[in-house]
Image (cartoon, rainbow, N blue to C red):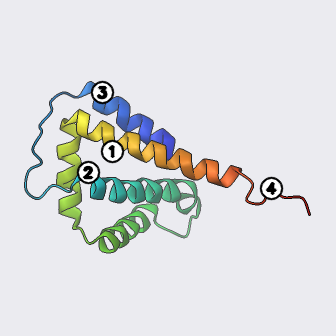
Amino acid sequence: MSRIFILFFSLFLLSSCGSNEEIPEGVLNPEKMQAVLWDVINADAYTKEFISKDSAKDAVKENLNLQQQIFAIHKVSKEAFYKSFDYYKTNTSAFKQILDSMTTQAERKNNEKIRPTNLSPE
């Protein structure tokens, strides 16, 4: 599910234009943005796949709660995250690096799940 979001963001960014070398004040650095964005995308996927199917729960409220928890964990404000997101959307080369790194991390984690941990015979 995360790959779908990454692909969507990649395509969106490729259609955008502009590139600035200097990151403005109040914008998360690429490493921090990557970590927060990864968790936000996973929270969105979790909400869509599980919470939205539970009629007793309000998926929008649950997703907002998850996002607030993510921002608290990473010690960033909602405003700083969305300001950063807007910045990176218009700076495709920087956002592409973030997304490429996220994709690489996801593939590495996926490969670790698939690879057997003990190859010696019993």
Instruction: Say which amino acid is labelled 1.
Output: Ile
Q: Earlier in the sequence, mark 1 or mark 3?
A: 3
> Vertically, is 11 above or below 119?
above
Instruction: Identify the residue at horizontal 56%, vertical 64% (top origin).
Output: 55
Instruction: Say which amino acid is labelled 3.
Output: Leu
Q: Nearer the viewer, mark 2 or mark 3?
A: 2
Mark 1 touching mark 4, by CB under 8 A? no
Instruction: Identify the residue at horizontal 70%, vertical 51% (top origin).
Output: 115
> Vertically, is 40 above or below 6?
below
Mark 4 touching mark 3, by CB under 8 A? no
Mark 2 touching mark 1, by CB under 8 A? yes
Q: Earlier in the sequence, mark 1 or mark 4?
A: 1
Query: Considering depth in this image, is 50 or 86 the residue closer to the camera?
Result: 86
Instruction: Identify the residue at horizontal 50%, vertical 53% (top origin).
Output: 45
Q: Which mark is residue 30?
A: 2
> Vertically, is 33 above or below 68?
above
Query: Considering depth in this image, is 58 or 107 the residue closer to the camera?
Result: 107
Q: Which class describes the residues within 10 Å of circle 2: few (<14), some (14-19), or many (20+)? A: some
